[in-house]
Image (cartoon, rainbow, N blue to C red):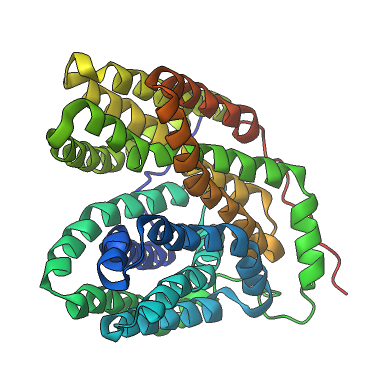
Amino acid sequence: MSARTPLWRLTPAQRLLEGGALLNSVAFFAAMPFAPLYMSEHTGLGKPAVGAVVGAVALTAAFGGLAGGVLVDRLGAVPLMRAGLVLHVAVYGLLAAARAPAAIVALFLMLGAARLLVEPGAKKLLSHAADEEGRIFRIRYMTLCAGAIAGPAIGGVLYHVGAVAFFAVPAAFYLAYLLLVLVRNRELAALHPASGDGDASAPSTLQALGATLRDRRLLAVVAGGVLVFFVFSQLESMIPLYMKGRYGDRAEGYFAALFITNAVLALLFQLPIDRVSGCLGRTTMVWAGAAGFTLAFGCFWASPAGLAWLYAGIVFWTVGEGVLLPMPDMAVHEMASDELKGACFGLSEVRQLGFFLGPVAGGFLLDAGTALYFAVMGTSIFLCVPLLARRTGRPLPEPAPV
């Protein structure tokens, strides 16, 4: 077996795209984790209404991703990314000045629409710049982890400074991303095939929609992604509530330490995971990732016996997360043809639905009993194994253009 190229050895185009992804991630995590607090303090909305607004951002990505991806295939990834980044800068700038509750709610909802213009295009460009296995999406996962470390630290300080600073800094990050895209426009455009985006001979919107929605392999990957996010969402939703019942006022400090440990380990584990994945098959890796989540839930359940179980659990959790979270994007990269990459990556955003369904189901299960909660969550992750372990095979056929 030939030696694998080190994961960190990136081409100039890959470094460009990952640099933009890092700016995007830091900006997102600097503001969105604090969105519920901000809306609660400045709009007078109750907790259910605030939760609905925050959840609507994820639902917009889940159900609007396919439309955004089709637009990327028709109009081009780079133009749509520029438009989305301009919208991000404008929305955060307006949030810095907005004081009316209706305006604040409307602007937060517009952030979901802005993501629809940026994410499918950025993933399509990454796919064009990736190797055959799509290992660049492991690097993208690492940039998200880095953003999850730096972003909340920045946002936590700015939140206490004032609304103008809190929203102006994310706007500056998105502006830097926009300038990067504008300055390197030619290099990004070169990633597209000659018959690429915006070409009148490209498949029509209806043809692209039909081709993606009929492909069972793609739908299996999307379903697998929903299941992974369903389980993954528990760390930021139900696990803190479980800890609160066990540790009382100490739970916040314990969870903060666990969250930081998770983010740091996620960065450290990705290179070994990539190396191991070169030796083991995809099926084995999916089983290992699912087992990691299951062992983590077992450790969390045992945590009343000692804090060491919490940290053992977060180690297993990070293994499961590091293996499974990049897999849906890597699978889409393998199966999608050049003409349909935007639509396929857009449809794959339906997995964001797991972030909505996971906390809802987890809340009901945790109320019913901790034994039931951990049993269901620890076993349900294995439902993703037959969906993500199957080989993606040849690229999704391109529909004949009209």
Q: Nearer the viewer, residue 380 or 198?
A: 380
Q: Residue at x 29, y 82 (%)?
A: 99
Residue 181 visible in image: no
Q: Residue at x 13, y 39 (%)?
A: 253
Disc tally is 0
Horizontal side of 392 relative to 205 (left or right) equals left
Q: Position of residue 66 (x, y in %)?
A: 65, 62
In this picture, is 216 found above or below 384? below
Q: Nearer the viewer, residue 47 or 24?
A: 47
- In the figure, residue 164 lies in which quadrant? bottom left
Q: Position of residue 275 (x, y in %)?
A: 39, 33
Q: Residue at x 42, y 46 (%)?
A: 138
Residue 331 visible in image: yes
Q: Position of residue 295 (x, y in %)?
A: 38, 20
Q: Residue at x 36, y 81 (%)?
A: 89
Horizontal side of 335 relative to 119 (left or right) equals right
In this picture, is 44 found above or below 255? below
- In the figure, residue 259 lies in which quadrant? top left
Q: Position of residue 185 (x, y in %)?
A: 46, 81
- In the figure, residue 190 lies in which quadrant? bottom right
In this picture, is 170 found above or below 182? above
Which image quarter is the C terminus in? bottom right
